[in-house]
Image (cartoon, rainbow, N blue to C red):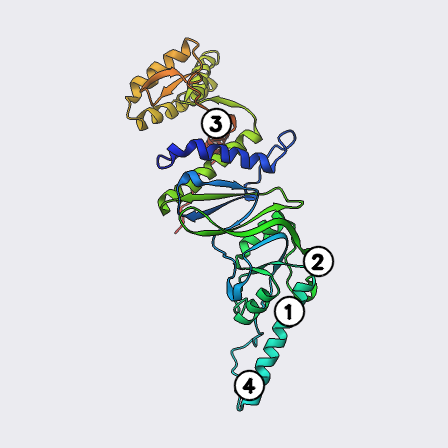
Amino acid sequence: SSKVVSQNSDILAPLAVDSVLKIIDPERDDNVNLSDIRVSKKLGGVVDDTELVEGLVFTHNKASHAAGGPTRIQNAKIGLIQFCLSAPKTDMDNNIIVSDYTAMDRVLKQEKKYTIDLVKKIAKTGCNVLLIQKSILRDATSELSLHYLAKAGIMVIKEIERDDIEFISKTIGTTPVAHIDQFIPEKLGKAALVEETSVSGGSKVVKVTGVQNPGRTVSILARGSNQLLLDEADRSLHDALCVVRSLVKKRALIPGGSAPEMECSVRLTEYSTTLSGLESYCVKAFADALEVIPYTLAENAGLNPIQIVTELRNMHAKGNKYYGINVRKNKITDIYEENVVQPLLVTVSALTLATECVRMILKIDDLVMSR
């Protein structure tokens, strides 16, 4: 639907269809939860580099390289924690005054012992990949904790946003842990591979693939050489996903190019002649209102709207129900043969909502002005 990335439609359209088919059962499901499809944007490369990832992609969260920590883990056991791996602080803004070196030494030893105990409890569960939620109270990690995690061979991915927790948990089957005492092997997710990999453009992302017992989720890594292309690719993917969702909800396609609206208008006009009185006027007015859609389409395409709508009305009156406005050829053609189709649900919803809106307005008896 975008002029900016329309030339990449042969890449983006199949991605949208495949991602929806990954998270539903085509035989039974009649709806799609688009929150189960996460589009992650990464600046660099070209739009053709956009790919579907069966697992997780972290574009803003890099693996920690502190103390030579690992950046590739096979047979990963993944933990997701919501507590901090740094020295605790007081709830209020207090200062601790250390008067001699021995007291300072005790503070540093206690901090080191506290950190080592945390790392040992994490390593004891068999966890070798640790996702750490971003903290707003204090730093979620310290240089000391990252050092000991690296020595334990645990890959660390920091600054996980709170909004991503539910998607991550559903994808890899892990349970967020709020306290170290609740960190047990049963709450770990498992994946065949977690690695920090380079993508085109020289940037890096972290991918989690080969998830055991995965939830019905999927990730799309969107690429673009500049922010405009990246945003347009994201928007176009969302539009395409919505179109596929419409087809899942109501599995029917109709011709585009204002053919269905004009066909309804012509048939309602014929039906209005069989009625009498007020009902006839109402049906005729509804039919005339439907002609606004082909009129607007012709106007937006730079055509003569009056001429186009009149010609289209004559075609449908003669029984050519698939004829619509071909904006590429600037004339009326058989839209069905041109493979210009749209989901039935889109047209039905638009007409239903417009009709309900008018009915609601007609129910207003009076207006009370207030200041």
- The answer to whether 273 is drawn above or below residue 253 in the figure is above
Q: Residue at point 41% right, 11% down?
A: 317
Residue 36 showing in the rendered view: yes
The residues bearing labels 4 and 1 have C-alpha atoms spaced at a distance of: 22 Å
Q: Residue at point 46% right, 17% down?
A: 268
Query: Would you name the residue on which mark 2 appears?
Result: 185
Name the kind of residue labelled 2 in the image: Pro
Query: Would you name the residue on which mark 4 appears?
Result: 104
The residues bearing labels 2 and 1 have C-alpha atoms spaced at a distance of: 15 Å
Query: Would you name the residue on which mark 1 appears?
Result: 118
Foreground mark, 1 or 3, reads 1
Percent from the top left, x then y, of residue 299? 31, 26
Left or right of 21 on screen, residue 315: left
Q: Which mark is residue 347?
A: 3
Left or right of 189 on screen, residue 301: left
Name the kind of residue labelled 1 in the image: Leu
The residues bearing labels 2 and 3 have C-alpha atoms spaced at a distance of: 51 Å
Looking at the image, which is closer to me, 244 or 360?
Answer: 244
